[in-house]
Image (spheres, rainbow, N blue to C red):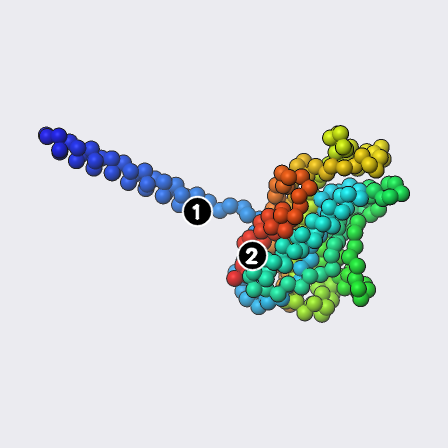
Amino acid sequence: MNNVTVKIMICVFIMLMFASCASIETKSEARQKDIPGDSGVDVSGPSLKAMEGIKKVSVLADICVAEHMNALLLDESVSADHYTLTGIQAFLKKNGIVPILCPAPYVGSYITVETGGDVKTDSGIENKKPPFALPSLSNNDKEYNEALMKVLASVAVLPTEKKERNASFKPDMNLSECLSVITDKTGSDAILVVIGQALVYIRDKNNRIIDNGSGTTFHKASPDSIQIIDLRKDEIEGLAVLIDLKSKTVIWSNATRLNLPETGRDYKTFFRDGFVGTMLREIPFK
């Protein structure tokens, strides 16, 4: 066997090895794609059909970055709520949907437990039950305002597990009436409810933690010591639900947990882009 023949055989052998590796890699990638990931999205065939008639969507968002509220956290929650609404509005327009913004903010209005939260005011500590912030309605439509809050509360109790989350939304006569009020007020085909909540703690100007999720140590903190809100203690839990106002059923939903931004109080890009993009990434408008 001459040198030329040996070289040809070696080349053939190497080519066969590369082909084998490529085949293994392709099969591995195929297996990965076949593994269903629990994205938290609940959508079904009938839901996809219902999507076809949706052109106008009411948007209701409520972002609360702490269970135990003080003035700074309230401001941050209201800010996060507005950024979220801005992001959702842009997302819907990009997908050819007309967004109709419902009154905002509703900070913590979905917290239905009958316990107070610590609210820091100029005059000291005030015990206040949620919602910690309410929207200002120019027309003072109390019925519409209460309908939105009841819908928020009903969405908040839906399970975070994907299995049958949509089917678990079974509005009673009172809630059905609330959905009818929203329909009459907005002329929307559906309402998109987005809820977000996180647990955070606060540090003082010396970087000492003055609240660790209990809310009790606010009593010992002077107003000028509350300066740094640390957002990296926990993640934010999000729930997005699309309710068809005609059938009064949930036709799409997503529940997931996201990492809070590493840049501390920089909410803008996180809630406007990252949070909204993740929560609505698989909504089949198109």
Which residue is pictured at 67% across the width and 39% down the height?
Answer: 264
Q: The disc labelled 1 sits on which kind of residue?
A: Asp
Q: Is residue 47 left or right of residue 225?
A: left
Does any portion of residue 136 appear in the rendered image?
A: yes
Q: Secondary structure at mark 2?
A: loop
Q: What label sits on residue 283 in the rendered view?
A: 2
Q: Please determine whether, in this image, residue 194 is positioned above or below residue 139.
A: above
Looking at the image, tell me whether mark 1 or mark 2 is earlier in sequence order.
1
Which residue is pictured at 62% across the width and 48% down the height?
Answer: 269
Q: Nearer the viewer, residue 257 or 73?
A: 73
Q: Secondary structure at mark 1?
A: helix
Q: Is residue 98 left or right of residue 19?
A: right
Q: CA distance from mark 1 to mark 2?
A: 21 Å
Q: Is residue 186 left or right of residue 275?
A: right
Residue 244 image offset from top left, x and y in percent:
63, 63
Quarter of the rendering containing residue 25: top left
Q: The disc labelled 2 sits on which kind of residue?
A: Ile
Does any portion of residue 209 appear in the rendered image?
A: no
Label 1, residues with CA under 10 Å away: few <14, some 14-19, many ≥20: few
Residue 100 image offset from top left, x and y in percent:
67, 64
Quarter of the rendering containing residue 252: bottom right
Q: Please determine whether, in this image, residue 273 is positioned above or below residue 248.
A: above
Residue 266 image offset from top left, x and y in percent:
66, 43
Residue highlighted by disc 1? 34
Residue 224 image offset from top left, x and y in percent:
82, 36
Extreme-right residue of the structure:
123
